[in-house]
């Protein structure tokens, strides 16, 4: 096997893993930790396969083939970004307060979050946030009234990601 085939195999494998992660964010309680990681994964998912094929095709050296592949890449990327604007990756909820931290794992925390609905006010929720890796986290919605806080330490750290101003 020559090196172009290896590049294609590794590229398709990498693209497949990124696509599986992006789709799992849509279908489960897993979310991206920030907007930068969300944009990177959306870009790789929407434009990764055509880019791999563009960079690893031997016929790219021909001008006509390069132009066709280039416009295919631009088209697929544009369509993908337009579709992704209609899909809510993760959630619009922003952390206002970290109320508790786990005694056994300080990275595991309970957060009070708000989702700005504009003129309609705010959606409120309390979640347990567990970090999976540097760009993914698991959010589990809980009922703060009936939750057992015996293994949690009260911290009340103000985060205010929405930037609300209090009187």
Image (tube, helix red, strand yellow):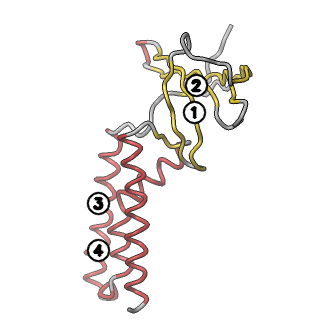
**Disc number placed over residue 76 in the picture, else none:** 3
- Return the mark for residue 18: none
* Separation of marks 4 and 1 at Cα, in angstroms: 42 Å
Quickly name the residue at label 4.
69
Say whether marks 4 and 1 touch (CB < 8 Å): no
- The residues bearing labels 3 and 1 have C-alpha atoms spaced at a distance of 34 Å
Q: Earlier in the sequence, mark 3 or mark 2?
A: 3
Measure how far apart labels 4 and 3 are at the Cα level: 10 Å
Residue 116 % position (x, y): 48, 21
Side (left or right) of 104 relative to 122: right
Residue 82 in the image, given as x and y percentages of width and height: 31, 47
Q: Which residue is mark 2?
A: 162
Q: Is residue 111 left or right of residue 18?
A: right
* Mark nearer the N terminus (4 vs 1): 4
Disc 2 versus disc 1: nearer the observer: 1
Residue found 60% across the figure and 17% down from its top: 148
Quarter containing the C terminus: top right
Q: Residue at x 41, y 72 (%)?
A: 11
Query: Which residue is under mark 1?
Result: 129
Q: Residue at x 42, y 80 (%)?
A: 7
Left or right of residue 72: residue 17: right
Q: What secondary structure is found at the residue carrying circle 4?
A: helix
Above or below, 45 against 159 in this view is below
Q: Position of residue 75 (x, y in %)?
A: 28, 61
In what element is the residue under mark 2?
loop
CA separation in Å, label 2 and label 4: 42 Å
Mark 4 nearby-residue class (10 Å; few <14, some 14–19, many ≥20): some
Q: Earlier in the sequence, mark 2 or mark 4?
A: 4
Query: How much space separates mark 2 and mark 1, taking CA atoms?
Result: 18 Å
**Image point (58%, 49%), residue name:** 133
């Amino acid at each position: 096997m020559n090196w172009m085939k290896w590049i294609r195999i590794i590229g398709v494998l990498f693209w497949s893993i990124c696509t599986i992660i992006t789709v799992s964010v849509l279908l489960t309680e897993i979310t991206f930790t920030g907007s930068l990681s969300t944009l990177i994964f959306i870009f790789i998912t929407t434009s990764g396969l055509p880019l791999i094929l563009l960079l690893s095709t031997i016929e790219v050296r021909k001008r006509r083939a390069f132009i066709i592949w280039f416009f295919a890449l631009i088209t697929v990327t544009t369509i993908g970004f337009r579709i992704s604007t209609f899909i809510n990756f993760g959630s619009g909820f922003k952390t206002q307060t970290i109320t508790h931290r786990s005694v056994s794992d300080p990275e595991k925390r309970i957060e009070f979050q708000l989702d700005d609905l504009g003129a309609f006010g705010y959606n409120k929720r309390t979640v347990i946030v567990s970090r999976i890796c540097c760009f993914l986290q698991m959010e589990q919605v809980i009922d703060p009234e009936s939750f057992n806080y015996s293994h949690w330490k009260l911290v009340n750290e103000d985060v205010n990601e929405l930037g609300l101003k209090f009187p």
